[in-house]
Image: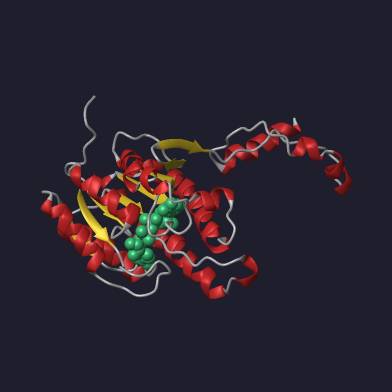
Amino acid sequence: MSELRFDGKVAVVTGAGHGLGRSHALLLAERGAKVVVNDLGGALDGSGASTGPAAEVVELITKNGGAAVANADNVATPEGAEAIVRTAVEAFGRVDIVVNNAGILRDRSFGKMTVEEFDAVLAVHVRGTFLVSRAAFPHMKEQGYGRIVNTTSPAGLFGNFGQANYSTAKMGLVGLTKTLGIEGARAGIKANAIAPIAWTRMTESLLPAEFEEKFTADRVSPLVAYLAHESCETSGDVFSVGAGRVARVFVAEGPGWRTDDLTVEAIRDNWEAIIAEEPHLPTTLGEQATASMKAML
Ligand SMILES: NC(=O)c1ccc[n+]([C@@H]2O[C@H](COP(=O)([O-])OP(=O)(O)OC[C@H]3O[C@@H](n4cnc5c(N)ncnc54)[C@H](O)[C@@H]3O)[C@@H](O)[C@H]2O)c1
């Protein structure tokens, strides 16, 4: 089988100074992509800034014979996001791939979480992904081609104690990915999301010590590269990935139950049918609404 390569393609990887983003950037560059290594260079909670982490990854890529430029802008501001994409266009002439990976944590139990902690996490994950994708979108539309890979999390898909801000943000990215998949279709732009588990500075205090050896970042990046490749036809989907296992994650709906006379008591009395798990998998709001229409016939 032929190797999947990215020669002639230009990729932006946000938050690529550490952890997963660093690993994605190294893999894409190794396979021929020209890479903008973006990283604000702050702490895990988003405080501070440094040009060091992005510059170090660029140095490593160029030492290995690849092409990369560093960018230390903030994904969460419109000016920062525009500057990140401008870096790609000025250095390499185009932008084909955006990997939205930058992220921070401000964990706190729900009862103690502050508005500032909630907003700060949504700003980087949700606004950041929206803003960088928005900056790249016109370039992709014009060239009739683009690949966007967003980073959600099992914490958002399934919930996690102490992460009300983070899980809200990460589930928000599922909605954004699905809508980008729909809106990008006519312009040849595909958008998907990964929900990784990997041993990084973000998780080293949360994961069991035995995860360090198996849940390496380089056991996540091949999925990012595949979703970023022109041969990938999938769009609007979400995949969990960790320790070499990859699985599609569905948003599903059960068969449901309906009546012409919906009352509070009717809901109580038919609860088992309402919560029944025989999923079908709508891929658009229209498909979901059609199922409701059919139930009326
Ligand atoms: N590690 C895991 O198990 C795991 C699980 C689920 C989701 N994720 C997600 O994967 C992504 C990468 O996380 P990681 O584990 O590699 O953590 P990490 O802390 O090693 O990497 C995140 C990077 O994003 C950068 N960053 C933060 N805010 C930024 C901003 N405003 N602009 C630009 N760069 C910024 C940081 O400097 C850092 O280098 C995050 O979105 C995270 O939420 C990770």
Looking at the picture, tell me which residue is in the foreground, 221 or 214: 214
- Specify the farthest residue to the top: 1
Which residue is pictured at 15% across the width and 59% down the height? 59
Q: Quadrant of residue 54?
A: bottom left
Q: Is residue 55 left or right of residue 253?
A: left
Q: Quadrant of ligand 1?
A: bottom left
- Specify the farthest residue to the right: 265
Picture layout, residue 37 above or below residue 285 = below
Q: Is residue 110 left or right of residue 183?
A: right
Q: Is residue 18 left or right of residue 123?
A: left
Q: Which image quadrant: the C terminus?
A: top right
Picture coordinates of residue 85, whole percent (x, y): 27, 60
Picture coordinates of residue 116, whole percent (x, y): 52, 75
Q: Quadrant of residue 113?
A: bottom right
Which residue is pictured at 34% across the width and 52% down the height? 20
Type of colouring = secondary structure
Q: Examine the rendering and report whether any part of residue 134 can be seen.
A: no
Picture layout, residue 192 above or below residue 16 = above
Q: Is residue 295 left or right of residue 190?
A: right
Looking at the picture, tell me which residue is in the foreground, 110 or 258: 110
Which residue is pictured at 42% across the width and 36% down the height? 245
Picture coordinates of residue 237, whole percent (x, y): 46, 40
